[in-house]
Each structure stands twice: as C-alpha cells, then as structure tokens.
Amino acid sequence: MNKLLNAAAIGLIATLATSASAEVIHATWGGGGARTLGEFVQKPFSDQTGIETRVVEVPNTAGAVRSPTASQYNAVTVTFFEGVGLSGTDLLEGFTDEEIPEVKNLPPEVVIRNEEGLIVGIPTYFAYYGIVYNSDLASAEDFKSWKNLADPKWKGKLAITRPVYAAAYDLTMLAHANGGDAENVEPGVETLKGLIANALTTYTSLAHMNTLLGTGEVTAVPFYSTRVWHLQNEGQKNIKIVIPEEGGLMLAYAVVSPKGAANREETRQYLNYLAGAESQVAVSVEGGGIPTNNTAKLPQAYLDTLGTTREELMKQMYVPDWKVVWDHHEERINMVEQLMSEAAK
C-alpha cells in the first residue's frame, strides 16, 4: 500500500511540476505597452485558462527572435514588416488554421504565413502612420497631401525618423502618394528628399519626438497614431494627426513564436486568445490602437477619443506588400542614409 501511495504521490508531484512549468513568456518592448499586455491581456487569459503568463521587456524584439536564446520566449511582439521578414526564415513556429480558429476573423492580408501556408504571425492590433502636427503652429489643411512635407516653407520645422524606419515607412508611403508602390519607390524619392531637407532633426526615440512636438521645436512629422492618442490623453490637446488624401500607412503589430520554445499547446491557446476580439479590444482601448479582428466592438467612449470608427479608418488605410518592402529593406536603408548624408553637407 505504501508503495502505491508513494507512486501516486510521485506522479502527482510530477504532474504539478509539469503544470507549474507550463508558462507562456511574452517578450515585447518596455514601457506602457508591456504593462498593458500584462494587466489587460495576460491576466484575463490566465484567469480563464489557468495557464501562467509573464511579460519580459527587451530593447529589440526582432533581434530577440534571431538570438540563439530565442526559445526562452514563447511569444514575441514584432513590427509587421519584421514579422514578414522572419516568415522567410526557419526561426518561427508554424500553426494550422485549425489550431488558431480565431484566424477566420482576421483580414487575410495581415496574417503572416510561411511558405508552407502555416500561420507564423498573429496581428494583434494596428496603428497608422499619418502626419502629426502642433496645432498652434499648423493646421490639417497644411498637410492635405503627403507631398506637402516637401514644401520649402517647412524648412527647419519638420523631423524625420531614423533610416531603418524611414526606408520602410516614409519612403513606402511617399511612393504611394506619388503613384508608385512597394515595388516601385522611385516616385517617392523627390518628396523624401524634400522632407529630409526640411527636417530640423532625425529623432532617435518616441520620447524625443514627443518633446520636440510639445515644445514646438518641430511643427510636424510623419508619426504614429498611438503616440498622438497617448499625448492627448496626457493633456497635450494641441498635438493632432491628419490622414492625408492619399491615405495613412497601416502598421499592424504581430506576435510570433520562436521555433523550439517549450509549451507549444499553451502557446497555441495564448496566440488564439491574442487573435480574438476580447484581448484586442482590451489592448486597443488601453494603448490607443485598433483591433485587427473584424468582430471586435470598440466602446463608444473610446471611439469618441479617436474621433472616428474602425470601419472609416480601414477605408483610409494603405496596406503595401510588406514582403516586397522587406526584400528591398537593406538597399533602401542605404539609399535613405545617402540622401540624409547629402542633405547634411
């Protein structure tokens, strides 16, 4: 009898140990987004499923996926174009549509798949890239078109991001505004040159840009809708965003799972939860984003802070072929660096 009891006890301990180790660790950038993820996504998921979750803050999420130690994370948030780039590697775990049933409610163009058609990236929300301006110094009418950024009257009054993002975001959007696309960015080069010539500075962080806009050192900048939402929530009502007539650049953020990470089943459940309306509404309302899930219903109070609806925003979004953007990324970074270097002479 004692032997049987001992065996049962050992089995129970082993089961508990396995259960306790079944933790989903999610790596993302530091700051408010990490806190929102932990409090408004992971806690409800853990309460519903009993699966332990944890947020880990890292400075470079795509770099974390490429690291030899990537398997320590079960999920990693990356920018969409980085997720598309990673989809062509053997670094991501793939899931079938049956394993992620919520995928049926996501726009197909923002679900990241590998060459075998497996899901390797879940889009959890999107922001957009528009023209952000200080309304004490300019108006929405001043930036009805992306081309207005090249107007010489803004000399020394604008800002631009670092080449790694300017190549992917600014150049791509300016190409579209001038009749090009992700494959043919040449039409956007002249406008980009004008923007660079008008730029007072190349901003190095979101906090840096927030300060420049708030103090009025910079009048306008191509920037992120989520940052405007946060600034306005903090009381800076003179910081506004306009979507030019050519549209805004849709920027989805995706969650990927490094290949070889433990607890695949728990991770699968977590990814499906991230794809669902409940988590996407929560993270959007707390972070200023827009759900990618088509069934998500945003509270009216939150829509009032946005000043529009999800449906209306979607109509104004430009979604380029991010695979093409990624495939040409290095050469376009070099191009932007050269343009900036020439402007500085």
Image (cartoon, grey):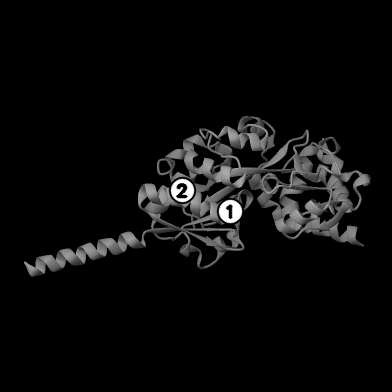
Assign a secondary structure to mark 2: helix
Rounded to the nearest whole Å, what is the CA distance between mark 2 and mark 1?
17 Å
Q: Is residue 317 above or below residue 14?
A: above
Res 78 → quadrant = bottom right
- Give the x, y percent position of residue 316: 69, 33
Task: Determine the residue positioned at 86% across, 50% down.
Answer: 193
Q: Is residue 8 left or right of residue 69?
A: left
Quickly name the residue at label 2.
271
Q: Is residue 217 above or below residue 136?
A: below
Q: Is residue 7 left or right of residue 273?
A: left
| Front-most of residues 309 and 101 | 309
Give, as a three-letter code, the residue at label 1. Answer: Gly
- Give the x, y percent position of residue 274: 48, 46
Quickly name the residue at label 1.
33
Task: Determine the residue positioned at 36% across, 62% down.
Answer: 21
Who comes first in sequence, dot 2 or dot 1? Answer: 1
Q: Is residue 67 left or right of residue 144?
A: left
Give, as a three-letter code, the residue at label 2. Answer: Leu
Task: Determine the residue positioned at 52% across, 43% down.
Answer: 282
- Give the x, y percent position of residue 20: 34, 61
Res 161 → quadrant = bottom right
- Give the x, y percent position of residue 27: 53, 59
